[in-house]
Image (cartoon, grey):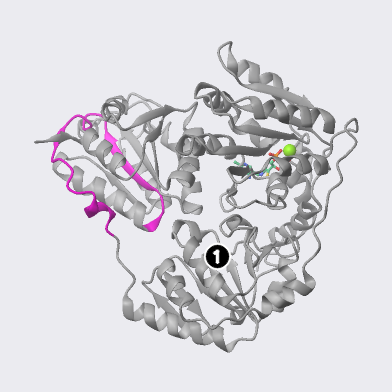
Amino acid sequence: STTTIGGYLATRLEQIGIKNHFVVPGDYNLVLLDKLQENPNLDEVNCCNELNCSFAAEGYARANGVAAVVVTFSVGAFSAFNGIGSACGENLPVILIAGSPNTNDPHDHNLLHHTIGTYDLDYEFEMAKKITCAAVQVKHAEDAPRLIDHAIRECLSKQKPCYIEIPTNMSAVACAPPGPIEGVLQQLPSEENTLKAAVDAAAELINSRLKPILLAGPKLKCAGAQHAFLRLAESLGCAVAVLPSAKSLFPEDHPQYVGVYWGQVSTKKADAILEWSDLTVCAGCIFTDYSTTGWTSLQPAAHRLEADFDNVKFPNHYYGQIKLKDFLDALADKVTRNDSSMEEYQRIRPSPTLVQAAEPTALINRKEMARQIQQLIDSNTTLFAETGDSWFNGILMDLPHGAKFEAEMMWGSIGWSVPASFGYSMAVPDRKIITMVGDGSFQVTAQEVSLMVRLKKPIIIFLINNYGYTIEVEIHDGPYNNIKNWNYAALIEAFNAGDGNARGYQVKTGGELAEAIEKAKSNLHGPTLIEVQIHRDDCTSELITWGHYVALANARPPK
Ligand SMILES: C/C(NCc1cnc(C)nc1N)=C(/S)[C@H](O)COP(=O)(O)OP(=O)(O)O
Ligand SMILES: [Mg+2]
């Protein structure tokens, strides 16, 4: 039997666990969209534009492990490149599928619509190569199975986005049917001699130190190494801190959890205990200017063992071709228990700060808003924190067992959280989702709330209206940080257009906020946007401190 190239791709998407693919149609991808829809186990989800489409797929991949977005040539792909950049920086396997011009056009020397007006139609493919781990153009039917399988295999094994370009006249062309999916899923295992050498050397280093500590990084997730990390933590018995981009990858109710390590803006004195230790075992960590508060909190290499996605390094040692999960699992069986950093932490652990409820009639402020959001988080909640002071409000939240936290701390493209939380909700419909997003970010992707309306997603959106770009104000202020205010709550009615269940509230006091939250809890058939209006400078003290150091890092004179 044979299948079509579009049918082949649809089967592969289904086999790797995709149920929803995110699309914006265009004449270069319509036949392909038909082929995907013909697969009974795939359902397309329309987005308002390709920026939101790529962010929705990125969010879907955070919950589902892999996602696909289908766009049209150039005008679609160029917007989608933003979300693919995010997937690349955030280590998420998102498959970007682009419909492209008819294969005859280059030979016929035709100029085409949706292009930059050149005869060379490979520019998109060339650009995609820069932001994916594999990019293919399916120009001949006999090559289709090999190219599609290659792109998907690389995407899954490297946990990075890939690019598959399918000309409009190829989607319905016959090709060989897909072979067993195992041929696509197969991955290179850890090389066992290297793994053993790495574990022996690392165990010797850790056992030789007086007060080691563990630091969880974001790649624990794409490496599937969270459980192995927990095992290592429990066999070592030491204090465990997480990077801000790894919040919720280690349970915050765990007795060994000591907080988010973010330099001077760490939580629960995690920075003190980490500075006290004489070895930081970093697992899946990514150290950037933002995650080190302008490079002010990077441990010296002599005090760091870095176990990464597929390699381990520490002073005078490097081991490649070993998987993080295997390394942490084997190390858990070799380390000697040493809880000295936990003992010390018990001496310096700060007592929990109980925030008093504000007077219900008092003007709402950030502190009261955060206090009320904290009460909303339960074991089934995923909290999305948009780039902005929402990062800091989010990091400061305490997560009960099972609660999850999503932020885009590498890519940091404002507007991500609205489509991303929508896409995430498509993968895990039973999860409770709370999105904290600033006014500036919301203005970038607001229209995706209409898809939450269409698919009846009861996402609770806290729209923090501080009348501008407050992060930028704290880093470096100027007239450009002031934005035009919207009536955000009224916008929701526009998205309902008479047949939706979304609700929008503007709150000015703590009492009004509490009421709006109660209404949000009972709105199960659509999103609820709660616009919290606070003073322009009413931000976390952490943002002010962090902004100062990041601004210094940005201002370093050229060498
Ligand atoms: C403009 C920008 N960053 C620069 C930027 C510009 N463009 C894109 C796509 N992404 C970016 N991060 C940022 S963080 C704003 O302060 C966000 O404002 P808002 O959403 O209102 O949040 P806060 O007020 O809490 O900062
Ligand atoms: Mg703002």
Q: Is residue 261 visible?
A: no
In x, y percent, where is residue 161? 40, 49
Query: Which quarter of the figure has residue 264?
Result: bottom right
Q: Relative to 420, does residue 300 appear above or below in the rendering?
A: below
In the rendered structure, the answer to whether residue 194 lies left or right of residue 501 reads left
- Furthest-left residue in this view: 1
Quadrant of the picture in which ligand 1 is shown = top right
Q: Give the side of residue 463 with respect to residue 351, left or right.
A: left
Crowding around mark 1 (Cα neighbors within 10 Å: few <14, some 14 to 19, many 20+) is many
Residue range in magenta is: 158-186
Quarter of the picture containing the C terminus is: bottom right
Residue that carries the numbered disc 1 in the rendered image:
285
Residue 402 in the image: x percent, y percent?
57, 50
Q: How many marks?
A: 1
The residue closer to the viewer here, 528 or 536, is 528
Above/below status of 440 relative to 542: above
User: Going 72% across and 29% down the picture, which residue do you hit?
Assistant: 518
* Residue 87 drawn in magenta: no
- What residue is at 30 percent from the left and 35 percent from the top? 119
> What element does badge 1 sit on?
loop
In the picture as drawn, the residue positioned furthest to the top comes out as 498
| Image coords of residue 279 (percent x, y) | 61, 79
In which quadrant is the N terminus drawn? top left
Is 180 part of what is drawn in magenta? yes
In the image, residue 241 lies at what x, y percent?
Answer: 64, 66
Residue 45 lies, with reference to residue 399, above or below; the image says: above
Q: Residue 167, relative to residue 473: is it above or below?
A: above
Viewed as shown, does residue 546 lie left or right of 509? Answer: left
Q: Is mark 1 within 8 Å of ligand 1?
A: no
Residue 13 in view of the camera = yes
Q: Quadrant of residue 68?
A: top left
